[in-house]
């Protein structure tokens, strides 16, 4: 510990990311945190682990296989040798009707027609598909994050606007109280400004509670704690987009179907293996010897499933239909994406077209507020009239803030929807 304290630069670099994350938070950081900490991240790792185990199991097809076979039977008739004459010194053995055999067999695949390799490829595509499905669900978190993030941003802007209103009211109140002491202003005007200040405090409390709720929802999605004093960074409308994971999912699913077609072809090929079998039985391979005997044999085994030739057509038709199904799903997905993107694009354009008028209205309301403030200071305007102009100015400012954020949100939603 003492050694570490000798290096303040090291401590600063080590703890700076933690300090920064506690002070500010960006929209892209929320995406990254949600991808890493939301329970779906663990699901993606589990899908990868399952896929790895399945591939390892497919590789075991080439491992030597050992099995034990045993049977005990009783039969009503056995082979008998009946000679027409009896030969001295020659005794014909009699086979028992109860027989048994216990043997172990060791086999090794020599040729499997490429089925293991194709099966491994199929399991690989299946694992990728499951992981990509998780990526699709993770991507959906972006829309929910956008909702809470921009809600909190808007609340921050509204709180900043209320701070300006509060400062203005406090300044007006000081001057009005001085006028009242000099007998120029009325007490009802002083009390009216005090009431407005209390209303502003109430609104600030409501905004703080709403912001707290938005940050808590954001914390749930990102799987991390977000301090109330954390400053949210206003995102740019041109922030970099990420390709829709559904597009890659469709590609993976099609590749998996093609691999299944290749796997079908291997089912029509013969399989060759070597084997060795050893055990005991009664009778042994010499069925005329009724005593228990040692059994051993080794050789090659050829297996050819000819039924695959007449089931192959239907299997290929099923895979072809599955491929068409994925194509249709991709077409429907793209249609929905185009429709959502068009709506977001139109919203962005509509809000941006409103901004010039919002700015002009705010400028006019600012001039009106300044004149009203001067008139109030000179005692020629009532507090209620001034408050009406002040509230109108605040509303104009809030409208501008709202439409600016809505324009950025619509643009980000467009990029999120299209992945462009």
Image: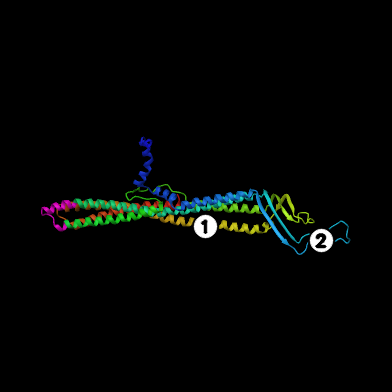
**Residue located beneath label 1 in the image:** 329
Residue 62, percent from left and from top: 64, 48
Using the rendered view, name the quadrant where residue 8 is placed: top left
**Residue located beneath label 2 in the image:** 80
Using the rendered view, name the quadrant where residue 314 is placed: bottom right
Give whichever of discs 1 and 2 has the lower sequence position: 2
The Cα atoms of the two marked residues, 1 and 2, are separated by 71 Å
Q: Nearer the viewer, residue 167 or 327?
A: 167
Q: Nearer the viewer, residue 281 or 253?
A: 281
Residue 158, percent from left and from top: 29, 53
Mark 1 surroundings within 10 Å by alpha-carbon count, few (fewer than 14), some (14 through 19), many (20 or more): few
Using the rendered view, name the quadrant where residue 79 is placed: bottom right
Residue 117, percent from left and from top: 62, 48
Q: Is residue 101 left or right of residue 323?
A: right
Q: Nearer the viewer, residue 260 or 71?
A: 71
Q: Is residue 310 left or right of residue 51?
A: right
- Can see residue 53? yes
Q: Is residue 174 magenta?
A: yes
| Magenta segment boundaries in residue numbering | 172-189
Please name the residue shown 26% across and 51% down the image: 163
The local secondary structure at tag 2 comes to loop
Residue that lies at the very extreme toward the bottom in this rendered image: 76
Give the number of marks: 2
- Can see residue 406? no
Which mark is drawn over residue 361?
A: none
Q: Main secondary structure of the magenta part?
A: helix
Q: Nearer the viewer, mark 1 or mark 2?
A: 2
Split into 4 quadrants, where in the image is the N terminus?
top left
């Amino acid at each position: 510990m003492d050694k570490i304290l000798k290096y303040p630069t090291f401590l600063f670099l080590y703890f700076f990311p933690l300090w920064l994350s506690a002070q500010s938070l960006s929209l892209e950081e929320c995406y990254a945190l949600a991808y890493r900490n939301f329970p779906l991240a663990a699901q993606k790792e589990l899908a990868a682990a399952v896929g790895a185990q399945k591939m390892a199991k497919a590789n075991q097809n080439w491992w030597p296989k050992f099995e034990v076979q045993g049977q005990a039977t009783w039969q009503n008739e056995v082979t008998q040798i009946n000679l027409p004459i009896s030969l001295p010194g020659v005794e014909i053995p009699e086979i028992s009707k109860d027989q048994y055999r216990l043997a172990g067999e060791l086999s090794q695949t020599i040729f499997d027609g490429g089925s293991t390799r194709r099966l491994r490829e199929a399991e690989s595509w299946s694992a990728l598909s499951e992981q990509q499905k998780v990526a699709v669900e993770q991507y959906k978190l972006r829309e929910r994050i956008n909702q809470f993030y921009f809600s909190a941003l808007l609340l921050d802007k509204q709180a900043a606007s209320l701070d300006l209103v509060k400062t203005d009211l406090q300044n007006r109140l000081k001057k009005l109280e001085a006028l009242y002491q000099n007998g120029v202003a009325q007490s009802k005007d002083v009390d009216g400004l005090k009431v407005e200040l209390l209303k502003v405090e109430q609104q600030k409390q409501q905004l703080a509670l709403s912001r707290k709720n938005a940050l808590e929802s954001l914390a749930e999605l990102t799987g991390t704690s977000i301090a109330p004093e954390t400053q949210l960074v206003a995102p740019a409308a041109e922030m970099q987009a990420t390709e829709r994971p559904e597009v890659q999912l469709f590609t993976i699913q099609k590749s998996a179907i093609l691999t299944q077609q290749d796997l079908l072809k291997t089912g029509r090929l013969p399989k060759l293996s070597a084997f060795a079998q050893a055990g005991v039985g009664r009778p042994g391979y010499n069925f005329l010897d009724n005593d228990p005997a040692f059994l051993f044999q080794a050789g090659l085994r050829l297996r050819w499933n000819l039924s695959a030739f007449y089931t192959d057509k239907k299997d290929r038709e099923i895979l072809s239909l599955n491929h068409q199904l994925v194509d249709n799903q991709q077409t429907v997905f793209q249609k929905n994406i185009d429709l959502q993107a068009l709506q977001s694009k139109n919203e962005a354009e509509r809000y941006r077209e409103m901004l010039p008028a919002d700015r002009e209205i705010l400028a006019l309301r600012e001039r009106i507020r300044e004149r009203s403030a001067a008139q109030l200071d000179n005692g020629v305007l009532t507090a209620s009239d001034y408050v009406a102009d002040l509230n109108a100015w605040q509303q104009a400012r809030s409208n501008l803030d709202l439409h600016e954020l809505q324009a950025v949100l619509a643009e980000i939603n467009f990029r999120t929807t299209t992945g462009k």
